[in-house]
Image (cartoon, helix red, strand yellow):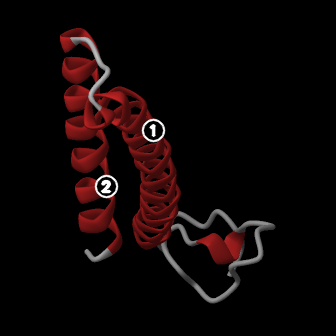
Amino acid sequence: MVPGDPSRPSTRADSDEPFGDGVDDATYDLVYRATRDAIWDVVGTATLILFYLALSAIGLSVAVGGLGPFVRGSAAPAALVVGAVGLAVGLLAALRTYRLVTE
């Protein structure tokens, strides 16, 4: 058989690539795209988890800063609102992190 023979289907075995086992182009492309998507899915999920962890830490620290003086009895109503919003954002981010980790 001569490489590039029109009487047989094109395979990666005809080329200089390391896939000499006769995998055709469609199968190779399908596996390549599935592998690439899986890798990006893992990297994307890890990045999203780190983002939510940072958001949770920031939100909870704002909540402590805003609600701490209110608990001691010396806070303005604006600090209470900022602390409540920080607590909500921090808890939502923590919940989302938990859901991503346990999927």
* 89, 11: nearer the viewer: 89
Extreme front residue here?
73
Q: Are marks 2 and 1 in contact (CB under 8 Å)?
A: no
Residue 17 vs 93, above or below: the answer is below
Residue where numbered disc 2 is placed: 94
Q: Secondary structure at mark 2?
A: helix
Provide residue 85's location: percent of width, then percent of height: 22, 27
Which amino acid lies under the numbered mark 1 shown in the image of this protein? Ser
Residue 79 vs 101, above or below: the answer is above
What's the mark number on residue 27?
none
Residue 76 vs 90, above or below: the answer is above
* 2, 50: nearer the viewer: 50
Provide residue 4's location: percent of width, then percent of height: 64, 62
Which residue corresponds to the image point at 27% horizontal and 28% vertical from the top-left? Answer: 73
Image side of residue 1 versus residue 27, left or right: right
The image quarter containing residue 1 is bottom right
Which residue corresponds to the image point at 21% horizontal and 46% vertical from the top-left? Answer: 92
Residue where numbered disc 1 is placed: 61
Image side of residue 40 versus residue 60, left or right: right
Provide residue 12's location: percent of width, then percent of height: 62, 71
Q: CA distance from mark 2 to mark 1?
A: 13 Å
Extreme bottom residue here?
21
